Amino acid sequence: MSLRQWTSGVRKEWTLLTRDWHALGLLFAMPLAFVLVMSLAMQDQFSARAGKKIGVLIVDNDVSVASKALVTALQNSGAADIRIAAKASDVAALQAALRAGDHAFAIAIAPGYAQALADAKITLADSVVLTVAPDTSKQTEMIFQGTLREIMARERLNALFAPLALLSRSQGGEDIAFDTETARPRIDYVYRAGKASQAPSAVQQSVPAWLVFGTFFIVIPLSNTLIRERQQGTARRLRTLPVSQGVLLAGKLAPYFAVNQLQVVLMLMVGRYLVPALGGEALQLNGSMAALVAMSVAVSCTAIGYALLVASITRTTEQASLLGGAGNLILAAIGGIMVPKFVMPETMQQLTNISPMAWGLEGFLDVLLRDGTLSDVANEAAALLSFGMGMLALAWIVQARRTEQ
């Protein structure tokens, strides 16, 4: 590949792209507007999810008066929907139950809990294990942890000091205190791809969702440019030049790839700085930078491959705009962009897996929400790149047949 030929192709495409300011502005203005509106308008609804009654699965392996008293105290607290497991379960079974999505927490009461409760020197962390489900928000976790710790402290107080406290008061003595740190449960987490998974906040959901959506709208300017070249005879004249089709294609796609990367940077900065300036929650840029770059590149390649296919199978700019725009809306609706996946019914959640936008959104959530590394997003990135290469191959085949006709 000649570098001079490639740079000439890039310069030509960039000139054509920047002439259409309306389409170029839409690529940035549309996702920016969606990010701002949805992040600010939906933050209360996303936060309210933490306040709803939560499902808690309890496994009582001690089966004692003390363990039953703990379960009863949790039921009477009204903070959770308590469900008692029919039989003793091991750690793997509890984690499988949490991954199924029916419970926010699981509490395992180990054998010997009653004995540990009555001994102030023994920490209860070895006897009570609280396991957190992958989609439980941090706010919900902290609220329920506080409730459980308060109940455990009260139960230990009753077991250790109630008789002594009554005797002390009857003799005019002071109340007896104890170290509440020993009345804490052990906290475990169900992990996804090696990282703890949480439900996203409004800004954590909106920024990657509309970022992916906006990236796919590169289909409109790219397909319009290719179709105009065919209609005006430019594509035919380019084929007569002593330049390989690969060089022409690489020069054509580079500016659109650069625009996609600018979109990603802009949307992340909007979530990080502009949304909190307007009263919303700031986007936390967690995870590996390499993983973030990998997802940005993979989503862009998929969007460009899809745009090339649309340009190849349509004959007019109107057809390309209609097919590309409608296709994006369908992929977004299915892929959890417009409606978050976690509020969908189970059947719809399974359906999201057919949309490449869902793969991109999940990969970005792995990075921004779950502190993901490059290995954590490898599956999503590979799926997106494979899909993009498949679309590119189909577009090449369609275009080759059209040229032969």
Image (cartoon, rainbow, N blue to C red):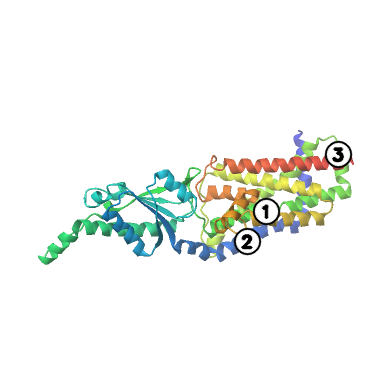
Q: Which residue is mark 1?
A: 331
Q: Secondary structure at mark 2?
A: helix
What numbered label is drawn on residue 239? 3
Sequence order check, earlier mark of 1 and 2: 2
When the figure is inspected, residue 217 is found, relative to residue 280, above or below; the finding is above
- Tell me which amino acid carries mark 3: Arg
Residue 305 at x, y percent in the picture? 72, 45
- Tell me which amino acid carries mark 1: Leu
Residue 28 at x, y percent in the picture? 67, 57
Mark closer to the observer (1, 2): 1
Sequence order check, earlier mark of 1 and 3: 3
> How packed is label 1: few (under 14 Cα within 10 Å), some, or many (20 or more)?
many
- Spatial distance from mark 1 to mark 3, Cα to Cα? 34 Å
Instruction: Examine the rendering and report whether any part of residue 7 can be seen.
Output: no
Q: Which residue is mark 2?
A: 34
Circles 1 and 2, Cβ within 8 Å, touching? The answer is: no
